[in-house]
Each structure stands twice: as structure tokens, then as C-alpha cells.
Image (tube, grey):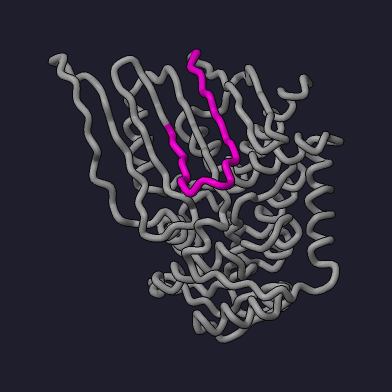
């Protein structure tokens, strides 16, 4: 098996909790030759902790090194780094949110196409064995109703269980530059907006994106957004989507910062079957998603099963897929073109709230 030389840009929580440990586990597929972060302390720490030979504070130095591919998990926005990575001939795995505007997405797709390299969105739940089983069940159903619920505590409650380190040494202007970049992208996407609408837009892009792309995998894109509600100063969103077959999806994301329990569910209902997926927080390790199937069989007997789910981590599965795309020319299941559809849906959900 050919090992791909890979670099990681962004050495924060998602890199420390998932990507670096998983790349170490996938040592037959990947060789991490460099990491990068604008924080000198974070770059040094991650390089030392995971025995990476080189670390940088300027991503351009990493792109000039011998890496064939990069994982982008730095603070948003990621568009400029992604475009530079493609222009340097690299394959790029872009953590969510991939971007905020259709214009950003188009620039990234164009650069990826020019380079002829792989551009994959960090949509790990598509690769979750529980989700894949649920999708398989749904394909045999006449789906009438879908419900997605995302009840989200403060991430700090869960990160406190893990050894995640930060160093408080960001260079002057780094955070301000990131904020300005996000504001510019948001302006491209939805124009001027009240603070609660801005907040809702970013939570849809950053957290509920997992629910939206999973929903799209099963139902396709909606034909109508019947209703959007934003409340709790933009820390909660509900919407109703309408599909071509008449089915509805009701989705809700709400911030419940002082509760420990994280709850994220995908519920798919037909006349004679329901499929329910429960996801753990994305900052957990070793906790599996679960899927249950309930229905009535051909003899009229009601049943409820909980299929066996492989122990493979969704994060590991998506990296294996990235490797196969690079080495074997496999088409990415979560390409940047797919991500563009979700960016457009988020913009439309906000438009529905604003009545435009």
C-alpha cells in the first residue's frame, strides 16, 4: 500500500483529538511529514506529541515541503489556503465548515479542477457505519417524514475530558484577520443581517452542517423551505423542508450550554418502518453511533432491532476514503461540489426566515 505524505494545517482541538491520532493509526496509508499553526506553541506541541519531523507557522512553507496532501482544520475561513493548496498541486481535505458563500466554494472547486487533485469535505458522518446502515434502510422505504434534532451543550464540557492544549500565543492581528474574513464571506452569502441572523447562519454552517449533508444524502435537496424560525438570540434554529415526494423534514438546532448531555438524532419515518440514528458528540473518542430499526413485517408482527455496527470511527473511515481517492483514483463521496449544495441550502434557509 502506498503511503501518502500529508501535512496538517491547524493544530487545535479537532487535530489533537481526532486527525493526528487517527493519522498515526493509519500509518500504512499516511505519513505525516509536517504540521502548521499560527501559534508557535501549538505547532511545536503537536509535532512533538505525534513525532512529526517538521512544524511551521506559515502554511505556505508547509505547501512548499514534500507533502502530497493536506488536511485543513485551521480557524475559518479556509478558502484562500485551500486555493493555494490546489495551486501547489496538493490534494486537500477541508474540515467543515468548508466555506460560507457560493463564491468561495466556486473558487475552491475551480482551483481543484485546475490542479486535477482531490478535494474532499470533512463530512465524517457520511462515513459513520450507523449512518450508512440507516441510509441503506431508507433506500427501501417510502419516506414520509424526517426529523433531525441537535441539542448542543458547550463543547468545553466535553473537551475538558481530553488533553487538548492551547498556548495563548497567537500573533498580533491573527484573530482579527480571521474575523474579517468570516465577515466578508458572510456578506457575500447573505448580505447585511441582524446579529441573531448572523449567529444562526454560522451555527448552521459550522455545527448543523452535519445534519444537513446527511439529510441530503438520504432525501436529496428539498423543493421548498416552508418555514424557518430563529430564536434565543440566534442560538436556536428550526426549519421545515418539503421534498418532491411530499415528505417533510423538521430540523432543530438549539444551544443548551449548561447541560452535559449531547443529543443529535436522525429519524426517518415511513408508513411501516422507522429508522433512528443517535450520534455522540464529535469530540468523543471510542463512543459509537447507534441505529435502531422498527417496523411491521409481512406477517403483521411488530419488531425492533439494533443492528450490529462496525467499530470503525467515522473520522478514520473518511481518511481511508481520502487515501483511496488519492491512490486509486476513487471519486470522493464528499466532494467540494457536494459541499456547494449544502452552502446553497443554508443560504436559502436564512432567506426563508427573512422572507426573501
Q: Residue at x 27, y 26 (%)?
A: 294
Q: Position of residue 79 (x, y in %)?
A: 73, 55
Quarter that holds the C terminus: top right
Q: From the viewer's perspective, is residue 137 above or below residue 301?
A: below
Q: From the viewer's perspective, is residue 253 above or below residue 116?
A: above
Q: Position of residue 208 (x, y in %)?
A: 58, 40
- Residue 59 occupies which quadrant of the picture? bottom right
Q: Residue at x 83, y 34 (%)?
A: 193
Res 338 visible: no
Find the residue positioned furthest to the front. 258
Q: From the viewer's perspective, is residue 46 above or below residue 155?
A: below
Give the extent of the magenta segment: 246-266
- Toward the viewer: 11 or 78? 11
How many numbered discs sit on the rendered protein? 0
Quarter that holds the N terminus: bottom left
Q: Is 249 within the magenta?
A: yes
Res 40 visible: yes
Q: Residue at x 36, y 29 (%)?
A: 138
Q: Is 64 within the magenta?
A: no
- Residue 315 occupies which quadrant of the picture? bottom left
Q: Position of residue 247 (x, y in %)?
A: 48, 17
Q: Position of residue 22 (x, y in %)?
A: 44, 67
Describe residue 344's horizontal placement relative to residue 6 as left or right. Answer: right
- Toward the viewer: 247 or 235? 235
Q: Residue at x 45, y 32 (%)?
A: 218
Q: From the viewer's perspective, is residue 55 above or below residue 218?
A: below
Amino acid at each position: 500500500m502506498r503511503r501518502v505524505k500529508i501535512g496538517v494545517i491547524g493544530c487545535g482541538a479537532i487535530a489533537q483529538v481526532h486527525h493526528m491520532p487517527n493519522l498515526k493509526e493509519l500509518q500504512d496509508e499516511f505519513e505525516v511529514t509536517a504540521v502548521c499553526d499560527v501559534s508557535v506553541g501549538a505547532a511545536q506541541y503537536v509535532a512533538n506529541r505525534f513525532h512529526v519531523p517538521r512544524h511551521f507557522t506559515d502554511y505556505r512553507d508547509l505547501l512548499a515541503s514534500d507533502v502530497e496532501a493536506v488536511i485543513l482544520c485551521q480557524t475559518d475561513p479556509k478558502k484562500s489556503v485551500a486555493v493555494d493548496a490546489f495551486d501547489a498541486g496538493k490534494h486537500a481535505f477541508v474540515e467543515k465548515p468548508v466555506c460560507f458563500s457560493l463564491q468561495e466554494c466556486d473558487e475552491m472547486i475551480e482551483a481543484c479542477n485546475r490542479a486535477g487533485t482531490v478535494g474532499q469535505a470533512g463530512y465524517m458522518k457520511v462515513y459513520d457505519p450507523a449512518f450508512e446502515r440507516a441510509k441503506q434502510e431508507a433506500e427501501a422505504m417510502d419516506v414520509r417524514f424526517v426529523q433531525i434534532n441537535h441539542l448542543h451543550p458547550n463543547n468545553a464540557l466535553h473537551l475538558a475530558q481530553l488533553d487538548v492544549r492551547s498556548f495563548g500565543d497567537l500573533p498580533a492581528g491573527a484573530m482579527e484577520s480571521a474575523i474579517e474574513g468570516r465577515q466578508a464571506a458572510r456578506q457575500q452569502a447573505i448580505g447585511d443581517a441582524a446579529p441573531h441572523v448572523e449567529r444562526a447562519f454560522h451555527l448552521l454552517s459550522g455545527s448543523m452542517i452535519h445534519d444537513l449533508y446527511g439529510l441530503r444524502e438520504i432525501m436529496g435537496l428539498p423543493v421548498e423551505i416552508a418555514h424557518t424560525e430563529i430564536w434565543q438570540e440566534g442560538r436556536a434554529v428550526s426549519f421545515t423542508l418539503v421534498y418532491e415526494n411530499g415528505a417533510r423534514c423538521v430540523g432543530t438546532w438549539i444551544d443548551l450550554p449548561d447541560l452535559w448531555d449531547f443529543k443529535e438524532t436522525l429519524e426517518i419515518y415511513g408508513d411501516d418502518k422507522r429508522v433512528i440514528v443517535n450520534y455522540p458528540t464529535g469530540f468523543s473518542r471510542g463512543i459509537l453511533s447507534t441505529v435502531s430499526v422498527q417496523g411491521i413485517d409481512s406477517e403483521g408482527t411488530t419488531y425492533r432491532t439494533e443492528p450490529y455496527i462496525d467499530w470503525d470511527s467515522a473520522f478514520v473511515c473518511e481518511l481511508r476514503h481520502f487515501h483511496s481517492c488519492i491512490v486509486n483514483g476513487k471519486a470522493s463521496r464528499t466532494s467540494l461540489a457536494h459541499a456547494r449544495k449544502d452552502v446553497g441550502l443554508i443560504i436559502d434557509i436564512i432567506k426563508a426566515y427573512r422572507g426573501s
